Amino acid sequence: MLRVNVVTLFPEMFVGAFAASILGRAAEKKIVEYRVVNLRDYAHDRHHTVDDAPYGGGAGMVLKPEPFFEALDDLKVAPPIALLSARGKRFEHADAVRYSMGQELTLLCGHYKDVDARVATAAGVEEVAIGDFVLSGGEPAALCVVDAVVRLLPGALGDHESASTDSFYDGLLSPYSYTRPPEYRGQRVPDVLLGGDHAKIEAWRRSEAERITKERRPDLWAKHEKDE
Ligand SMILES: C[S@@+](CC[C@H](N)C(=O)[O-])C[C@H]1O[C@@H](n2cnc3c(N)ncnc32)[C@H](O)[C@@H]1O
């Protein structure tokens, strides 16, 4: 069982997401357990203050280090601890695989202008970005990470095939899929998929995966060629 801890100012953002679809089913099946804690519970003043003005001045508020450190002490977590951060290393399939193989994963969500740098540089903490854009908070990023990780846990998907044939699993983008009807608004399903010859279908899927990856992600294609 993977234990997923989330430290956030907005626990309510996880309630629906952790109860629905694959994430919810995985929890029901005891493949994953979620613990979502409110950063504000680790503030000690009357107003539950978790932020303060930045040293050196400037716009926006910075989340204080103490509540994060105290939440981590309280949860007694083992690494990996991922601080969601636009300046972090880009989260990729390989990270999802690495996280899915551990016993525990802890996600720290920032908000406002920034998080005190001492959280990012604390022992065991890695900064993780989900793309080259800025979100208002780490919560949607944490949800992306949890979803990508949980779907890789054995038993989380009804049919493991569907993870192993997804994009990135073998370093390529996935070929397109079709379902009925065979023709719709002038667009036809490729004949090979209608023919029932499984070897031919596999060969078509492979060549489509290669074509699409080569066209759209030359970086992935170059890596794939090197690794082959
Ligand atoms: C408004 S952002 C802060 C952005 C920060 N001032 C910067 O320029 O890098 C607030 C929080 O959203 C989260 N966040 C924003 N963009 C993100 C991204 N691309 N990946 C992961 N987390 C992100 C982080 O937790 C961050 O602390």
Image (tube, rainbow, N blue to C red):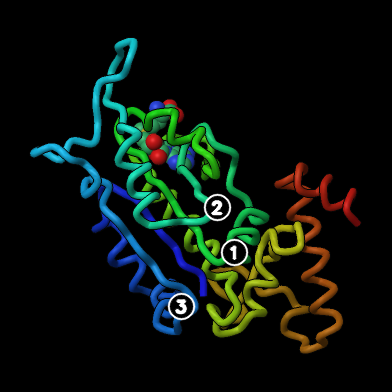
Q: Locate residue 78, reporting x and y percent.
A: 51, 56
Q: Residue at 63% across / 72% down in the picture?
A: 163
Q: Which secondary structure, mark 2?
A: loop
* Amino acid under disc 1: Gly
Q: Locate residue 123, reporting x and y percent.
A: 53, 40
Q: Which secondary structure, mark 1?
A: loop
Q: Residue at 82% across / 47% down in the picture?
A: 223
Relative to 96, residue 67 above or below: above
Ligand 1 image-quadrant field = top left
Residue ID for mark 1? 102
* Amino acid under disc 3: Ala
Q: Is residue 184 left or right of residue 204?
A: left
Q: Are marks 1 and 2 in contact (CB under 8 Å)?
A: yes
Q: Are marks 1 and 3 in contact (CB under 8 Å)?
A: no
Tell me the crowding category of disc 2: few under 14, some 14 to 19, or many 20 or more residues within 10 angstroms, Cα based. some
CA separation, marks 1 and 2?
8 Å
The mark lying in front, picked from 1 and 3, is 1
Q: Is residue 135 visible?
A: no
Residue ID for mark 2? 80
Q: Is residue 118 left or right of residue 56?
A: right
CA separation, marks 3 and 2?
20 Å
Residue ID for mark 3? 26
